Image: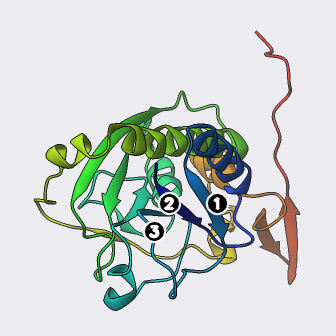
């Protein structure tokens, strides 16, 4: 059985999915701790870094057998921040999610597992996150269950890399000169509480919140 740490940011949306992952790994007989910072004193078999923004120093990574990151892009394309959001804004409906080994360079380690997340264009942020959270859970549990055989599937990242910038609240700004249809993907990725859609008019800022009716209209 393995000693496992799951590390995330304290305010991250992914916490409920991490709690489920913790329960499931414990039910498999593993020792699991959840943290809001990287443990620089103790060693683990696996450290899962999920929705965690800090870059870890190489000497700290060396404490553990494996330090694993889940990132929502087909690496080396789409490194950086908020890759799922940026790709939804690009109009993509199939997005690769990757489990890879962390190293001292951003999103550059060897790849162990990948899955496709499929969307139909109607999902809002909570639904997008649900698919992301469930697929993250599946990748992490698959790595643990298939270890150490999973190491034979490891491959280096190849090809041209690209980077997404960090998204900020200002990126939820609507363009009054464009139609709602043209901006529907921006509505899909805004967070009504943390970074709602907004526009500015006559010196004032106006916020718009979006939700979907529970029952289909068709």
Judged from the image, the secondary structure of the residue bearing numbered disc 3 is: loop
Q: Do residues under tags 3 and 2 come within 8 Å of each other at their CB atoms?
A: yes
Query: Residue 113: horizontal and vertical position, in percent?
Result: 30, 44
Residue drawn where x is 45% and y is 68% of the image: 44
Foreground: 75 or 180? 75
Q: Do residues under tags 3 and 1 come within 8 Å of each other at their CB atoms?
A: no
Mark 2 sits on what residue?
3
Foreground: 196 or 39? 39
Judged from the image, the secondary structure of the residue bearing numbered disc 1 is: loop
Q: Earlier in the sequence, mark 1 or mark 2?
A: 2
Mark 1 sits on what residue?
177
Q: What's the mark number on residue 80?
A: none
Residue drawn where x is 21% and y is 61% of the image: 110
- In the figure, is residue 44 to the left or right of 65? right
Q: Is residue 156 visible?
A: yes
Judged from the image, the secondary structure of the residue bearing numbered disc 2 is: strand
Which of labels 3 and 1 is toward the front? Answer: 3
What is the CA distance from the residue labelled 1 to the residue labelled 2?
55 Å
Mark 3 sits on what residue?
44
What is the CA distance from the residue labelled 3 to the residue labelled 2?
5 Å
Residue drawn where x is 33% and y is 70% of the image: 102
- In the figure, is residue 51 to the left or right of 99? right
């Amino acid at each position: 059985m393995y000693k496992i740490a799951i590390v995330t940011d304290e305010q991250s949306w992914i916490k409920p999915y991490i709690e489920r992952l913790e329960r499931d790994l414990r039910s498999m007989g593993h020792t699991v701790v959840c943290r809001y910072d990287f443990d620089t004193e103790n060693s683990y078999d696996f450290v899962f870094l999920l929705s965690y923004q800090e870059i870890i120093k190489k000497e700290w990574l060396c404490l553990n057998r494996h330090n694993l990151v889940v990132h929502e892009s087909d690496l080396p394309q789409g490194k950086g921040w908020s890759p799922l959001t940026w790709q939804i804004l690009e109009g993509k409906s199939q997005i690769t999610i990757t489990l890879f080994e962390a190293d001292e360079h951003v999103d550059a380690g060897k790849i162990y597992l990948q899955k496709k997340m499929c969307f139909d264009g109607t999902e809002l942020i909570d639904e997008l996150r649900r698919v992301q959270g469930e697929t993250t859970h599946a990748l992490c549990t698959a790595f643990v269950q298939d270890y150490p055989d999973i190491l034979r599937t490891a491959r280096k990242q190849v090809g041209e890399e690209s980077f997404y910038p960090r998204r900020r609240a200002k990126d939820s700004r609507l363009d009054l000169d464009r139609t709602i249809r043209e901006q529907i993907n921006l509505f899909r990725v805004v967070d009504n509480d943390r970074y709602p859609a907004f526009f500015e008019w006559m010196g004032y800022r106006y916020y718009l919140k979006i939700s979907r009716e529970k029952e289909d209209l068709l």
